[in-house]
Image: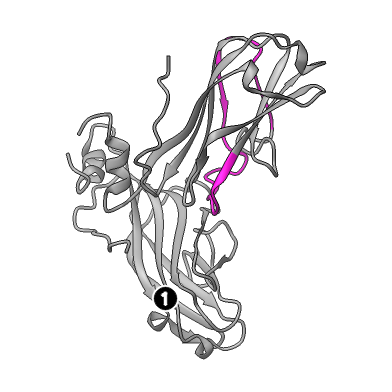
Amino acid sequence: MSAGNVTTELETSPVGMGMNKVSQWCDHSDFTKSTRYGTLTMTQTIPVGAFVIGSKVTVTEAFDGGTNNLKIGKTSGEDEFCDGANIAVGTAAVVGDSAEDPLEFISSAATVYLRIDEGSDWDDVTTGNMLVEVFYFSTAVELGKGHPLKY
Amino acid sequence: MSSGNINVELERSPVGMGINKVSQWIGYADFADGGSTAGTLNMTQKLPVGAFMLGSKVRITEAFTGTVSLAIGNSTDSNKYSDDTTVAIGTAATVGESPQDRLEFIASETTILLTATHSSDWGLVTAGKMLVEVFYLSTVVELTKGHPTKT
């Protein structure tokens, strides 16, 4: 077993539970303007059978402009994957939160929506880059998922 | 892969999540007597940024003298990692608790504070030894952390 397939080994083991994630590098330019908000739908989804752990956000370039609070949820503007709270992305830092319902069971594939509230006008945001990771205990094998490099 | 490095393999995998802990053998004499009923100790290892808290396990191999309880927390909340309560360490046994905030995300490196309280005076405690383990889901590699043997 190597680090490259340890997750698959866990998922294919007799117990059949591993740890996996939805992850994506998100640049400020990837977001779609909706008045004061920037919205983005993550490419990967959380599969059926997952138990959600929480979200980790590594902000490598601060989002400028106004307040810049991030919500991570099942629909745009909701926050099931960041404990019903905001995550500040206006400063370069490692931030995150648990799931609002820790270890929530996912019974149908869940799309992950990101929404940043700039405070007044999304056009004021001209910088910002972050790695968003939403972790979960996995009970299904996801061979082709793949994840971006962390650096 | 061997059991010796499986945690590192998980942390280094593309998913980048493993299971880790802060752990330490602690004797009654390691606590600082606060002059009243409580003895306090800061654990040597720290919780790293990016961890999601799982809970605490305490194995008492030598009972602490008298009626003694242990709170596991930090400098701002003394029982945050023992579910807002204490565990009894006056009897040789294995005890534990979940964190107060399930799967809490650790946003800044955190020192774990142990507070042991005797029913009347910490100075009356003349025996006691235990292994304290505070478990978390880890998202960073901690190559040199090391852990004491369990026996």
Question: x%, y% of residue A6?
Answer: 23, 43
Does the magenta run of residues contain B23?
A: no
Question: x%, y% of residue A10?
Answer: 26, 39
Number of other residues with Cα within 10 Å of mark 1, as a class: few under 14, some 14 to 19, many 20 or more? some
Which residue in the rendered view is the most extreme toward the left?
Answer: A1
Q: Identify the residue at horizontal 31%, vertical 52% (top origin).
A: B15
- Give the answer, above or below, for where B7 lies relative to B90: below
Question: x%, y% of residue A146?
Answer: 23, 59
Query: Which colour style is shown?
Result: one colour
Secondary structure at numbered mark 1: strand
The quadrant of the picture occupied by the N terminus of chain A is top left
- Give the answer, above or below, for where A99 lies relative to A29: above
Q: Identify the residue at horizontal 47%, vertical 53% (top origin).
A: A54
Question: Which amino acid type corresponds to the residue marked 1 in the rendered image?
Answer: Leu
The quadrant of the picture occupied by the C terminus of chain A is bottom left
Closer to us: B30 or B102: B30
Does the magenta run of residues contain B106?
A: yes
Closer to us: A20 or B31: B31
Q: Identify the residue at horizontal 39%, vertical 32% (top origin).
A: B146
A55 relative to B16 in the view: left or right: right
Q: Identify the residue at horizontal 77%, vertical 15% (top origin).
A: B123
Closer to us: A108 or A15: A15
B104 relative to A28 in the view: left or right: right
Question: x%, y% of residue B63?
Answer: 62, 9
Closer to us: B150 or A110: B150
Residue pointed to by mark 1: A40
Q: Magenta residues, as a range?
A: B85-111
